[in-house]
Image (cartoon, rainbow, N blue to C red):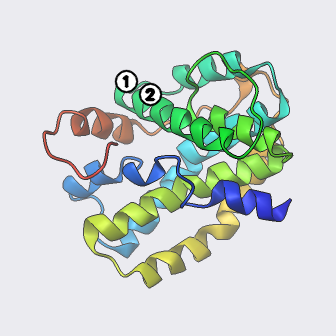
Amino acid sequence: MLATLLLLADGRLPSGGHAHSSGLEAQVAAGRVCDVADLAGFLRGKLATTGLVSAAFAAAACRRPGSWAGLDDGLDARTPSPALRKASRAQGRALLRAGRAMWRLPEIGREPHQPVALGVLASAAGLGPAEAAVAAAHGTIAGPASAAVRLLGLDPYAVHGLLALLAPECDRIAADAAARCDDPVDLLPAAGAPLLDIGAELHATWEVRLFAS
């Protein structure tokens, strides 16, 4: 199943992730992220907050088929920014489209948030909650890391060195998230990042931007 996990976590998967910076573009414009050291702090913060939440919900969605609507509502409650909710559902829709080309997916009945869609794909691919959590946690940092190269012109070797440095932390976050996959929705992680919420709302008003979010 390792090859399947690699396929699901591959940044080249045509799921639209390349069009999103996960809030980085707004932070770069605000002058908060200017170099690799700043990016390291940004990615660590992402992992500890939205990364943990995404990994937990992806693991739960993989573990509990039929509970997707409740999990999706739970993510809505944890995403106060309308712009981020829109971006998450757009990525979820694109991810399901890619997934249908690879596996037989169940009918979901709505456009889910990206972590829920990821859990659905992981389940359909024969993966378990732990693998779904790893894919979600990895995506939380890999997406904005790639965006940083385009936004700031950072050395891609240095950026990937940073991702390698963060890999153990990514694994730890994923393991913690997967261990909670049977928790009720209200008890799943709810860590927030208010500055990213504010940045997302400002970013959505820009007439010119490189990324959709």
Q: Position of residue 54 (x, y in %)?
A: 62, 40
How packed is label 1: few (under 14 Cα within 10 Å), some, or many (20 or more)? some
Marking on residue 109:
none
Residue at x 48% of width, y 27% of height:
79
Please name the amino acid that badge 1 sits on.
Pro
Q: Residues within 10 Å of mark 2 (few under 14, many from 20)?
A: some
24 relative position to 180: left or right: left
Q: Is residue 177 left or right of residue 162?
A: right
Q: Report the residue at 25% width, 34% height from top.
A: 204
Instruction: Please tell me how many numbered marks the rendered image carries.
Output: 2
The N terminus - image quarter: bottom right
Question: Percent from the top left, x then y, of residue 198?
Answer: 30, 35
Q: Is residue 129 visible?
A: yes
Tell me whether circle 1 and circle 2 mark residues in contact (CB < 8 Å).
yes
What amino acid type should be assigned to the residue bearing mark 2? Arg
Q: Where is residue 150 drawn, in percent x and y?
A: 31, 67
| Alpha carbons under labels 1 and 2: distance apart | 5 Å
In the rendered view, does 202 fall on the left or right side of 106?
left
Q: Residue 197 occupies which quadrant of the picture?
A: top left
What residue is pinned by disc 2? Answer: 85
Point 75% across, 58% down: residue: 5
Using the image, determine if residue 142 lies above or below residue 118: below
Q: Dot 2 lies on which element?
A: helix
Give the residue drawn at x 73%, y 25%: 187
Q: In the image, residue 35 lies at what x, y percent?
A: 31, 73
Residue 44 visible in this rendered orientation of the protein: no
SS state under label 1: helix
Image quadrant holding the C terminus, namely top left
Q: Nearer the viewer, residue 207 or 160?
A: 207
Towards the viewer: 162 or 87: 87
- On residue 82, the disc is 1
